[in-house]
Amino acid sequence: MSGITTGNSSTYEPLSSVYWGGDHLVLLDQRLLPEEIVYLKLSTPEEVWEGIHSMKVRGAPAIGIAAAFGAVLGGILYEADDSEGWLQQVVKTCAYLATSRPTAVNLFWALDRMKLAAEKLAADKLDTAALNAALLAEAEAIRSEDEEVCRRIGENALPFFKDGMGVLTHCNAGGLATAKYGTALAPMYLAHEQGLNIKVFADETRPVLQGARLTAFELQQAGIDVTLLADNMAAMVMSKGWIQAVIVGTDRVAANGDVANKIGTYGVAVLAKAHGIPFYVACPLSTIDLNTKTGADIPIEERPAEEITEGFGKRTAPQGVKVYNPAFDITPNEYVTAIITEKGVVQAPYHESLKSLFE
Ligand SMILES: CSC[C@H]1O[C@H](OP(=O)(O)O)[C@H](O)[C@@H]1O
């Protein structure tokens, strides 16, 4: 894996988080933002696994897109010219990439789609060069569909945001978490294009600081009014009347409408309800998992203690202290005002309304 430094963040261009570079995957190393913009070239499934696991690429849709291209790399590295052996290699690569992170369902959705595509392609007995080209087209389709899906999420969310509103968001569900536009931030971009003045309040989102490092960065560079908050300030700004809506992304929505999202989301949802503020969740259908009954069934990733005890290289806790570092929490569906998707907006009772999105 090698880096291409394109300069510092003062020359910011709209950034792509993940794209195919001809014969390799290109990832923006999001761990280095906002100070450095470094694009990495990844040529093996192992490098893609590590890129997802270490959060060089993060955000449910972006993780799925990266994994899809990782499956393509698995096929490209298969040297023989037999379709059955090629298929076995792609399927094995998908199973391997599925172990990189446990919570975002888009990872498994994308890999299942790549496996299905590979099975159909292998049945046609093409040579491996043709098989790899066709599988690459499937990964590119996943990426380009995500751009269109996020734009439609933005359009469906926009009516909830009026000129002059204050909106709080948690973590990063922007262009950096997807192929482009983002989910929760998509309406912010559209509102800005239409001349609406939405004041965004971004939680810093400890311990990895996606809000401070990514959301504040994205929105500031786009010229959108953004104020950065420490994670313990949401209650106060709500009590001051500065917030008229909360919108967040998600990594998995259970069949009953319970929502897995970045740690701290549940607390923001409880605060929103206590202040009579609507709490919206924005996501593509690929993040809705009807096979997972409730939030209790969603696996919650636990991450290294060092993210809390010495985040970004500065030790802020005693050596050997016990640490609990879940990367996500579950917001029960009763705190979710509406779920906004590319197919439309649904509200409780979510058992029925979520199913209707797939009919
Ligand atoms: C549009 S999905 C964004 C979602 O993913 C983030 O998690 P992570 O940064 O650990 O990948 C966070 O939960 C965001 O809401």
Image (cartoon, rainbow, N blue to C red):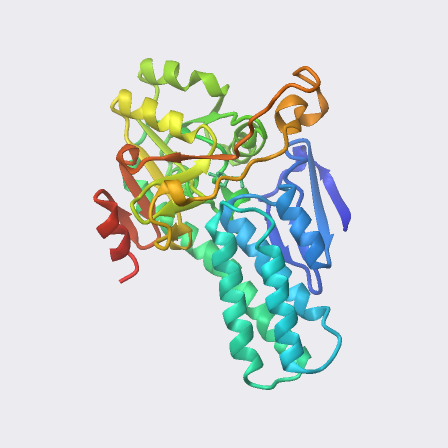
- Name which quarter of the figure residue 25 lies in: bottom right
Lateral position of residue 113 relative to residue 14, left or right:
left
Residue 84: x percent and y percent? 63, 80
Q: How many marks?
A: 0
| Image quarter (top left, top right, bottom left or bottom right) of the C terminus | bottom left
Lateral position of residue 351 relative to residue 265, left or right:
left
Q: Nearer the viewer, residue 30 or 52?
A: 52
Q: Residue at x 59, y 52 (%)?
A: 99
Q: Residue at x 71, y 65 (%)?
A: 23
Q: Nearer the viewer, residue 62 or 9?
A: 62
Specify whether residue 167 is in view. no
Lateral position of residue 141 relative to residue 91, left or right:
left
Residue 312: x percent and y percent? 68, 26
Residue 200: x percent and y percent? 42, 28
Q: Residue furthest right?
A: 2
92, above or below 277, in the image? below
Q: Residue at x 53, y 46 (%)?
A: 102
Residue 304: x percent and y percent? 63, 33
Lateral position of residue 94 relative to residue 154, left or right:
right
148, above or below 295, in the image? below
Q: Nearer the viewer, residue 77 or 9?
A: 77
247, above or below 201, in the image? below
Specify whether residue 227 is in view. yes
Q: Nearer the viewer, residue 62 or 164?
A: 62
Q: Residue at x 63, y 39 (%)?
A: 30
